[in-house]
Amino acid sequence: MSSYTTIQGDTWDLIAYRLWGSEYLLPLLLEENPKYRHVHVFDGGINLQVPDVDTTNYTARPAWLGDEDS
């Protein structure tokens, strides 16, 4: 487990994208940081817990959204 310190204006999806290259993994951050579930836009300086994620187990785009080329 590691941590991430927010930058003013960060959102859950932006943080997930920065960390793992996919905004669709944001639920993993929410699970580790229930105290901040109500936050939509972060102030700077908030320390979030970041789970270790093997991104090879996740697709960059959920299957239910269909192919990007379609």
Image: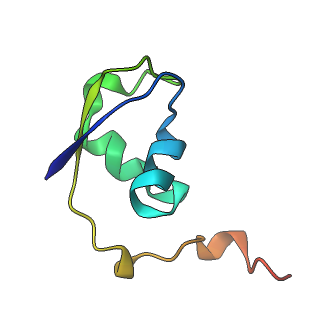
Displayed quadrant of residue 3: top left
In the rendered image, residue 58, in percent from the top left (x then y), is placed at 42, 75
Q: Residue at x 40, y 20 (%)?
A: 44
Give the mark count: 0
Q: Is residue 27 left or right of residue 61?
A: left
Residue depicted at 48% across the width and 21% down the height: 8
Q: Is residue 30 above or below residue 51?
A: above
- What's the residue at 82%, 82% (across, down)? 69
- On the image, the x and y values in percent for residue 18 come to 46, 52
* Quadrant (top left/top right/bottom left/bottom right) for the C terminus: bottom right
Q: Is residue 69 above or below residue 4?
A: below
Q: Position of residue 48 (x, y in %)?
A: 26, 34
61 relative to 69 in the view: left or right: left
Going by the image, does 23 lie left or right of 31? right
Residue 41 image offset from top left, x and y in percent:
53, 23
Residue sticking out furthest to the top = 43
